[in-house]
Amino acid sequence: MRDVENREDIDLLMREFYSRAMVDERIGYLFTEVAHLDLDVHLPVIGDFWESMLFRTGDYGRHGRNPLQVHMALHMLEPLKREHFDRWLEIFHAVIDENFAGPYAETLRERSVFMANRMLNFCAGVPALEIRH
Ligand code: HEM
């Protein structure tokens, strides 16, 4: 199996990831019902993010966005919990492992865990308000 080599490989991974994540029993609703995610808008941005991270050729910076803030905004709508991040990573890593192997594939795995931890800690620091009965 070959390693992740370019933007086309990243795009393939992201398309496959979202096709699974969006219909997933445990996290699918966060993308569809909470965020109302438009993949045509989102995929080029997330592709830029991972391309910047892996090959330093992407241009995520030009979007003027910050993934921590993007996920905090989501967390304020619907609390993002540890089990959501666990499931997100499970799907992300399965998609990587089924398609690629090598140092870049490993970097993708490591960076995703690192980011998930940062997001989880960031969100945990500002607990979303929940309806009390
Ligand atoms: C509970 C787990 C997660 C959920 C439900 C989730 C959901 C989402 C949603 C709905 C968006 C689009 C937000 C918008 O454009 O309004 C988004 C964007 C994004 N997500 Fe996640 N995410 C999760 C975890 C992660 C993790 C662990 C990473 C790892 C790096 C990640 C990376 C990104 C990136 C790079 C974007 C694009 C940010 C931007 O628009 O500038 N996500 N996520």
Image (spheres, rainbow, N blue to C red):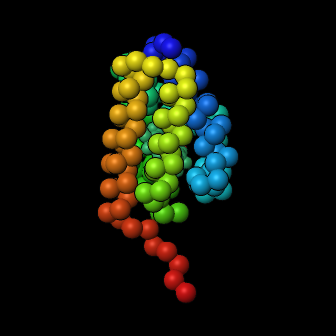
Residue placed at 51% from the left, 23% from the top? 10
Q: Pick the quarter of the image with the C terminus.
A: bottom right
Picture layout, residue 74 above or below residue 107: below
Residue placed at 37% from the left, 54% from the top? 120
Residue 43 visible somewhere in the drawing:
no
Residue placed at 41% from the left, 43% from the top? 67
Q: Report the front residue among 118 and 3.
A: 3
Residue 3 in the image, given as x and y percentages of width and height = 45, 15
Residue 63 in the image, given as x and y percentages of width and height = 45, 34
Q: Report the front residue among 45 and 115.
A: 115
Q: Quadrant of residue 110?
A: top left
Q: Quadrant of residue 98?
A: top right
Picture layout, residue 123 above or below residue 89: below
Picture layout, residue 19 above or below residue 116: above
Image side of residue 22 versus residue 49, left or right: right
Picture layout, residue 98 above or below residue 30: above
Residue placed at 64% from the left, 34% from the top? 40
Residue 102 in the image, given as x and y percentages of width and height = 40, 18
Q: Report the front residue among 106 and 74.
A: 106
Residue 109 in the image, given as x and y percentages of width and height = 40, 32
Residue 97 visible somewhere in the drawing:
yes
Image side of residue 17 versus residue 113, left or right: right
